[in-house]
Image (spheres, helix red, strand yellow):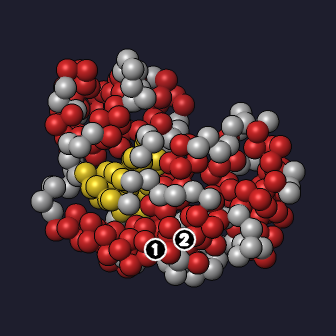
């Protein structure tokens, strides 16, 4: 799998906008009446709506499926969005910053060291191969933390956004790949339409929390100590309703007992969760 990094200002702004409006991190009143909350929020809301309404495109992230996304986004179909992005006045770390050099090196070094193990575990657990290319929009987090999000997927290419605080990177150079791995799985789950029910987004996130970024998969890859960020039950808080959380908390740990002999889908087929995933 080839890693392609993007630190272009426009794509970093888009990643932040999709994190706010696409992931639901803004309160509903702010989303509904963005003009009341300042120029930048208003402009960001217009950019988001335009970015997901391009004729014959999944979204503006389709530009990242091309060889040169920075040049692709200059095409006429993106002209309005680019103009608004250039008018969006937000502070960004300079592309030439030493921080990005260190972040790219940390991701490349860990992927290079762990790639064979990642391929092996993805195949054995999920019966899935890696995409040919993973495009990662990199940015510096303003707080001491780390955040990733799936942005787009095609047959051979996954696009994700990733940002991390400088102190978090200094503390643990494995942190980026631990968070990138579940976003990569989100891409593959979308590619193969794994969860299809009305609550598929909630279910997918809740299931993945058992594997990564602080779960059994990252533990098997030697990236994280078990329960480093709390128990699975604690990680489920806020991801799904209490009924599903209770069911998953009883079911998922049992997979650790058979993981070396059974794919997750085989395990799932023997539980009543399979019906829930497709309902």
In the image, what residue occupies the spot 57% across and 57% down? 128
Density class for disc 2 (Cα within 10 Å; few <14, some 14-19, many ≥20) is some
121 relative to 80, above or below? below
Q: Secondary structure at mark 2?
A: helix
152 relative to 53, above or below? below
28 left or right, relative to 91: right
Depth check: 144 or 109 in front? 109
Disc 1 to disc 2: CB gap under 8 Å: yes
Q: Position of residue 150 (x, y in %)?
A: 46, 47
In the image, what residue occupies the spot 78% across and 76% down? 257
Depth check: 86 or 143 in front? 86
Residue 214 visible in the displayed image: no
Q: Position of residue 162 (x, y in %)?
A: 38, 55
In the image, what residue occupies the spot 74% across and 68% down? 262
User: Any mark on residue 120, and which?
Assistant: 2
**Residue 140 is drawn in which quadrant?**
bottom left
Q: Position of residue 22 (x, y in %)?
A: 47, 36
């Amino acid at each position: 799998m080839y890693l392609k990094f993007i630190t272009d200002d426009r794509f970093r702004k888009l990643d932040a906008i999709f994190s706010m409006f696409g992931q639901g991190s803004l309160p509903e009143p702010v989303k509904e009446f963005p003009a009341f909350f300042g120029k930048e929020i208003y402009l960001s809301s217009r950019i988001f709506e335009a970015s997901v309404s391009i004729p014959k495109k999944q979204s503006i992230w389709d530009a990242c499926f091309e060889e040169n996304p920075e040049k692709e986004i200059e095409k006429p179909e993106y002209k309005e969005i680019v103009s608004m992005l250039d008018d969006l006045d937000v502070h960004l770390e300079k592309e030439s910053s030493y921080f990005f050099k260190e972040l790219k090196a940390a991701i490349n070094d860990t992927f290079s060291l762990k790639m064979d193990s990642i391929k092996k575990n993805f195949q054995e657990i999920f019966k899935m191969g890696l995409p040919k290319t993973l495009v990662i929009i990199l940015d510096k987090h303003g707080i001491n933390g780390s955040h990733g999000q799936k942005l787009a997927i095609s047959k051979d290419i996954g696009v994700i956004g990733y940002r991390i605080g400088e102190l978090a990177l200094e503390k643990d150079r494995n942190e980026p790949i631990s968070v990138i791995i579940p976003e990569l799985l989100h891409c593959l789950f979308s590619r193969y339409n794994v969860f299809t029910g009305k609550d598929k987004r909630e279910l997918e996130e809740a299931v993945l929390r058992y594997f990564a970024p602080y779960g059994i998969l990252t533990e098997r890859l030697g990236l994280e100590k078990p329960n480093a960020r709390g128990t699975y039950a604690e990680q489920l808080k806020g991801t799904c309703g209490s009924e599903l959380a209770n069911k998953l908390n009883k079911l998922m740990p049992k997979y650790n007992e058979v993981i070396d002999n059974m794919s997750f889908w085989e395990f799932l087929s023997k539980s009543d969760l399979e019906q829930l995933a497709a309902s």
